[in-house]
Amino acid sequence: GIYAEAQKMLRTLYPDVRTFVGTVEGYPSLDDVVEALKREARSKKVILKPLMVVAGDHAHNDMAGPGKDSWKNVLEAAGFQVEPVLHGLGENDEIAEIVVEHVKDAAKDAGLVVR
């Protein structure tokens, strides 16, 4: 699936950073990520980052919220030290440039002029 491919690509691009990708709803789930971390992690420190354009409700509540089922609290209960970083991909200048270029290309293909 796309998330396994994203994880594989991130691990290829950044071999010194052990990367695990999971989804709030779907596969791989939080349980899958916890099991993989227990098997493969070289450290007990986890940096939790949303792979979303905007760090909205899912990031602030499901991922890093105070509820016992949040990713942060589940990972801490599993023995990991968790640092949530609540910034969406849209806040990254390099990602924003890529999106703008794709929009320009799509507009050009549709015969539109974007300034």
Image (cartoon, rainbow, N blue to C red):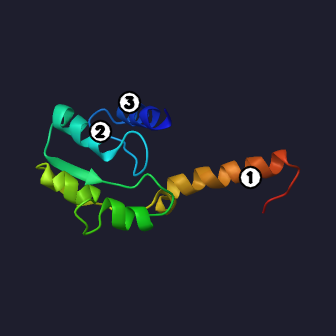
> Viewer-proximal residue, 88 or 25?
25
Query: Label 1: which residue?
Result: 104
| Residue 26 position in % (x across, y down) | 43, 44
> On the image, which quarter does residue 49 sit in?
bottom left
| Residue 109 position in % (x across, y down) | 83, 45
Give how far apart the Cα atoms at labels 1 and 2 are: 38 Å
Q: Secondary structure at mark 2?
A: helix
Q: Residue furthest right?
A: 111
| Residue 84 position in % (x across, y down) | 28, 60
Query: What residue is rendered at 67% in x and 50% in y?
Result: 101
Using the rendered image of the protein, determine whether residue 29 is visible from the camera's viewpoint.
Answer: yes
Q: Secondary structure at mark 1?
A: helix
Mark closest to the chain's N terminus, 1 or 2: 2
Relative vertical location of residue 57 with respect to residue 8 in this rendering, above or below: below
The type of residue carrying mark 2 is Asp
Query: What residue is rendered at 51% in x and 60% in y?
Result: 90
Give how far apart the Cα atoms at labels 1 and 3 are: 29 Å
Query: Label 3: which residue?
Result: 12
Relative vertical location of residue 5 with respect to residue 62 in this rendering, above or below: above
Q: Quadrant of the C terminus?
A: bottom right
Query: Label 2: which residue?
Result: 32
> Viewer-proximal residue, 36 or 51?
36
Q: Secondary structure at mark 3?
A: helix
Mark closest to the chain's N terminus, 2 or 3: 3
Q: Residues within 10 Å of mark 1 (few under 14, many from 20)?
A: some
| Residue 75 position in % (x across, y down) | 20, 52
The type of residue carrying mark 3 is Thr
Q: Residue furthest left?
A: 79
Using the rendered image of the protein, determine whether residue 87 is visible from the camera's viewpoint.
Answer: no
The type of residue carrying mark 1 is Lys
Relative vertical location of residue 50 with respect to residue 37 in this rendering, above or below: below
Mark closest to the chain's N terminus, 1 or 3: 3
